[in-house]
Image (tube, rainbow, N blue to C red):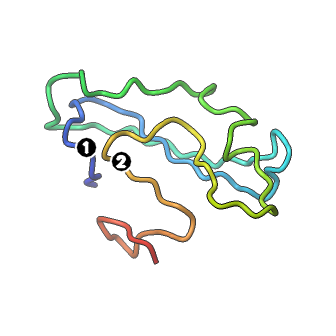
Amino acid sequence: MDIPRPADTAAGVYLMRAEVIALRTVSSAGGAQSYISCYQITVAGGIASVAATPAGVQFPGALKASDPGILINIHAKTEKRVDPGPDMVPGGTMKQAGSGCDGRAKTCSQR
C-alpha cells in the first residue's frame, strides 16, 4: 500500500498511529473513549538525513483527560473543537468527522 508522506521524511521504520475519540461521555474527566490503531510502516527511498525527522511523542503520556478536545461539553455551542494531541507532521493531513475516502481512493475529500 502506498501512503502519501512528506518528501523530507527520512528512510526508516515508523509507527503510524490513528485514533478516534468517542465524544458521547467527554463532559467529565476520563469520559473520552479512545479507539486506537497502530501500523508499523517502512519508509523506503526517503532522505538520508534524520534532521527532518520529527521528535515524536511517547504513549502513554502524550494525552491527558483534561486536554482541550478531550474534555469538552458536546452540548454547548462551540465554534471549533480543538484537536487533541501533538502537532501534525508538516505536510500531514487530519480528517474531521464527516470526511472520508470513497472506496480505495488515494486521497480523501470532504463529502
Q: Position of residue 106 (x, y in %)?
A: 29, 65
- Looking at the rendered structure, the kind of residue marked 2 is Gly
User: Would residue 64 be found to the left or right of residue 111 on screen?
Assistant: right
Mark linked to residue 66: none
Q: For residue 78, what is the image quadrant?
A: bottom right
Q: Position of residue 44 (x, y in %)?
A: 18, 37
Q: Position of residue 48 (x, y in %)?
A: 14, 25
In the image, is residue 107 above or below residue 14? below
Mark linked to residue 6: 1
- Using a 10 Å C-alpha cutoff, classify the residue at mark 2 as few (fewer than 14 neighbours), some (14 to 19) or many (20 or more): few
User: Would residue 80 be found to the left or right of residue 75 on screen?
Assistant: left
Q: For residue 7, what is the image quadrant?
A: top left
Mark linked to residue 92: 2
In the image, is residue 27 above or below residue 106? above
Q: CA distance from mark 2 to mark 1?
A: 7 Å
Asked if the residues shown at circle 2 and circle 1 are in contact, with their CB atoms under 8 angstroms apart, the answer is yes
State which tag comes first along the sequence, 2 or 1. Answer: 1
Q: Residue at x 26, y 29 (%)?
A: 12
User: Would residue 10 be found to the left or right of residue 31 on screen?
Assistant: left
Q: Residue at x 35, y 47 (%)?
A: 92
Q: Residue at x 39, y 71 (%)?
A: 109
